Amino acid sequence: MRFPFHPGAVPALLLSASLLGAVSPAPNTQTVTVRNKLNINRSAETISIPASRLAVLVKKYGAKNLLVKDASGKAIVSQAVDNNGDGTVDELLFQTDIKANASQKFTITGAANAAAQQPKSPYTTFARLVPERTDDYTWENDRVAFRTYGPEAERLVVAKQPGGTLTSGMDCWLKRVPYPIIDKWYAGHVKEAGFYHKDRGEGYDPYHVGDSRGFAGIGIWENDSLYVSRNFTGTKTLANGPIRTLFELSYAPWQAGGRTVTEKKILSIDLGSNLTRFEEHISADKPLPNVTIGTTLHAEPKGVRGEVKGEPQQGWFRYWEPMDDAFVGTGVVLAPGQVQNWKDHRTKAKEQSHLLVIATPQANKLVYYAGFGWTKSNQFKTAAEWDQYLATYAKRLASPLEVTY
C-alpha cells in the first residue's frame, strides 16, 4: 500500500567536546522513524523514502547498495524504484507491520557490497505484456492477479476474427497461491487454449469482462450514458520487484459526448494488497463533468443476486457476487472528497449494468484503488470481512504513516 511522504523535522545535533560518548551519526547511515497515528494495527505497509532524502548515500554507494535495517539491526527487504523510466531512482521502498499508535525506527545504511547482502523475499510483484496471448497486459502480487487488453485483441474484433476482446475494462484473475502464476498460466494457454479458465489448484479466470468496465475501468458518465475508451495502445513496465510493480498504459484519443478525451494510466500494486492503485491522467478539449469508475454487475446465475454497497462518506464501494462455487467481492476506494455520486445502475443492455462511482478529478488526475477478494483464496470468507478490509483500507489512506528523519 502506498502512502504519501510527510516531511519531518531533522533533530539538531548537539556537538560538544564535554559530552563524553556523544557520537554524530555515521555518514553512511540515515535513521527513519515511522509512526502509526491510528488506533488499529496495520500490516504490509509500504514506506517510501524519497531518493532526495538519501542523496549522500546514493551518490556514494548507488541506490541498489543501500540496506534497510529494523530496530534489532536485521536487514529487511527493500526495493529501489525509478518511477518514470528516466534512469534515476526516485524512492526506496520497504514494508512493515506496525501496531496501533506505535512508532518504529529503521536505519538505512550504504555499503559497497550491500546489494549482495539484501535479504531475498519468498514472494514478489510482477507485471508484463503478454504477446503470446493477443497482447494482454497482466500484473500480480502474492494475493491477486489482473489483466487488461491491447491493440491486437481489438484488431481481431474489428476484423471479425476469433480470439479478440474489445474493451478497456479490467479483468480479475482469481489466484489462491502466494507465488507468481502469470507465466505459468500463459504457458499453459499456449499449449491448451483457455488453460487458465480451469482451476487446477492455483486458481483460474472465471471473471467475465466482455463489453463492461470489468472491476475498475473508467468512463465519462453523462445523460445516462457511459462513454469509454477502447483497448490500450501502448505499455511501459517501469518496475518489478519484491515490494511493488509499476507500469503505464496509454490509450488513443476517444470521444465522450462531443469531447475528445486524452488518457493515460499509471498503475501499481504492492505486496500484501488486494487493491491496485490507479493514477488516471485524463483531459479533454472541453471540460469533463466527471471521471466515473465502473464495476460490472454480472448477470445473476440461478436467480442469486449480487449485492452492491456504498459508503461515500468513507470513500469505499463494493459488489459481492456468487461465482461458480464461491463468492467474489470487488471494491473501489478513493478520497471521499472526490466522490460526486454513485449509482447501482441496472439495465437490460448486455454487460452494461455497473456499480458507478462518479468522481471529480483534480488537475486532470484521479487516484483510486480497486481490486477483489475471493472466498476460495481463504483471505476473506464473508461479505462482512470484505467490507471491513475496504473500510480499513480507506482509513489507512486517510491517515498515512508519518515518516520523520
Image: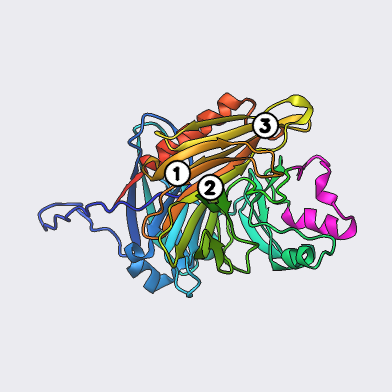
Q: Secondary structure at mark 1?
A: loop
Q: Secondary structure at mark 3?
A: strand
What residue is drawn where x is 80% and y is 68%?
159
Label 2 or label 1, whichever comes before in sequence order: 2
What residue is drawn where x is 60% and y is 26%?
383
Is residue 281 highlighted in magenta?
no
Q: Which residue type carries mark 1?
A: Leu
Label 1 or label 3, whichever comes before in sequence order: 3
Residue 212 or residue 379, whichever sits in front: 212
CB-based contact (under 8 Å), mark 2 and mark 1: yes
The crowding category of the residue bearing disc 1, from other C-alpha atoms within 10 Å (few below 14, some 14 to 19, many at least 20), is: many
What residue is drawn where x is 35% and y is 35%?
102
What residue is drawn where x is 50% and y is 42%?
357
Mark sitting on residue 334: 1
Is residue 248 in view? no
Q: Which residue type carries mark 3?
A: Glu
Instruction: Look at the picture and state if 28 lies above or below 302.
Output: below
Q: Please state the extent of the stretch shown in magenta in the rendering.
A: 182-206
Residue 238 or residue 229, whichever sits in front: 229
Where is residue 76? Give x, y as percent: 49, 50
Q: Which residue type carries mark 2?
A: Ile
CB-based contact (under 8 Å), mark 3 and mark 2: no
The crowding category of the residue bearing disc 2, from other C-alpha atoms within 10 Å (few below 14, some 14 to 19, many at least 20), is: many
Q: State how many labels appear.
A: 3
Residue 74 or residue 307, whichever sits in front: 307
In this rendering, position of residue 379 left or right of residue 301: left
Q: Please name the residue that numbered disc 3 is placed on.
A: 321
In this rendering, position of residue 99 left or right of residue 328: left
Res. 348 image quadrant: top right
Q: Please name the residue that numbered disc 2 is placed on.
A: 293
